[in-house]
Amino acid sequence: MSNKSAGLAGVVAGQSAIATVGTGQGLNYRGYSIDDLAMHASFEEVAYLLIYNKLPTRAELTAYIAKLVSLRTLPSELKSVLRLIPPTTHPMDILRTGCSMLGTLEPELDFTQQFAIADRLLAILPGMLCYWYLYNFADKEISGLSDEATIAGHFLALLHSRKPDKLQRDMLDVSLILYAEHEFNASTFAARVTAATLSDFYSAITSAIGTLRGPLHGGANEAAMELIAACITPDDAEREVMQRLAMKNKIMGFGHRVYKTCDPRSNIIKAWSKKLGVAQSAESLYTISERIEAVMWREKKLFPNLDFYSASAYHYCGIPTALFTPIFVMSRVTGWAAHVIEQRADNRLIRPDAEYIGPDPRKYVAIDNR
Ligand code: ACO
């Protein structure tokens, strides 16, 4: 009983050298602060840092970007499967299915392929997502390739079939950095549990995608957008939040399991949301979001997590709400990959105990006597 904890809160479930989260050191990826990375690095630099465990030199980064660009091709069998998935499907299920399908086409035969598979997934996910989305909602069959070197630019170019706006591309790049890694969160832990059985890389990432999908985790950014979009003025927003709180509903995009007073990523994405709102002379979404933040603090002492201001920032980029959580996947695949690699390097099966609360042992009753 003594070490039992609902939802494993506060339980140290293993060692990791990848990130610090809320330990008094702030959020760091491999020792580098999230503020420095968001301010100075590109997402590809951060991906390299997480997967290859060092900051790349300029030459290494140039080569890495070129390599990722060369890995974007969608296999024709994958496209056939994507075309079969109904338009009513949630886009997270596209990535879950697409990742699993890729694992049948390009299987991991031994663990020496793990870095190559991590890079392949990172490179292909935006094309996979946009291929299915545009096939169903724009009546267009795209190649999945673009002239954009960065993943942020590539995604926006595919989605909108034009060269991306610089401010939007820069915001998305920062957002991918912020979402890339966060220690033993639910989806990463799912990936590690799968990896710890010595299963293959794709199975670990597929488990993680399925875990990220829920509204208590990655799905919160979509739910936050639905709330913001339902309000026309800040006063509307205040009324709506008060009503939801009175009904004991959760407001998605607020609170955090580890952080207790603020999410260090939130102010960074909040500033980008404001910048985009001002640039587009469309600040109402931002001011509505700010009011929701103020009400949540006043009423519950709850603060926005990364998902909350990501919602308005993505909306300002013309990204459909249903694609918000898949963007999280496009980024977090780097953190998941780092954790799978780390788990495999010093593996032990992850298998906790349960506290039994069922009936005492009893006699089996034959079926005709029940
Ligand atoms: N809105 C309203 N009340 C909340 C919220 C919220 N967003 N978050 C927590 N609370 C309240 C709970 O109702 C509970 O109140 P009670 O003690 O009166 O019952 C108390 O705060 C503790 O909440 P728990 O859900 O038990 O806290 P836990 O640590 O298990 O959950 C979580 C953390 C899941 C993030 C929670 O804050 C939540 O559900 N937030 C909304 C979903 C969300 O934004 N998820 C994104 C997480 S960050 C990310 O994935 C990038």
Image (cartoon, rainbow, N blue to C red):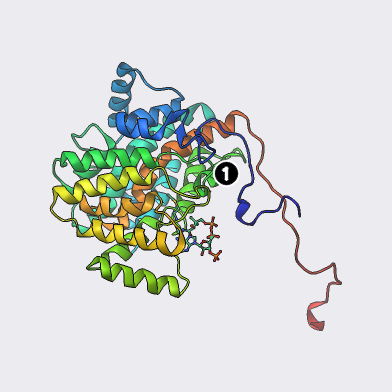
Residue 150 screen position, x and y as percent: 26, 33
Residue 330 screen position, x and y as percent: 36, 43
Q: Quadrant of the C terminus?
A: bottom right
Q: Residue at x 42, y 50 (%)?
A: 96
Q: Residue at x 51, y 26 (%)?
A: 112
Does label 1 point to a residue whose CB lies under 8 Å from ligand 1? no
Q: Is residue 200 above or below residue 83?
A: above
Q: Find residue 5 and report its image quarter.
A: bottom right
Q: Residue at x 40, y 55 (%)?
A: 93
200 sits to left or right of 262: right
Q: Find residue 76 and report its image quarter.
A: top left
For label 1, the residue is: 194
Query: Looking at this view, is 351 or 168 the one in front?
Result: 168
Q: Secondary structure at mark 1?
A: helix
Residue 236 screen position, x and y as percent: 27, 71
Query: Looking at this view, is 92 or 136 the one in front?
Result: 92
Query: What amino acid does circle 1 point to?
Result: Thr
Inspect this view and state whether residue 251 appears: no
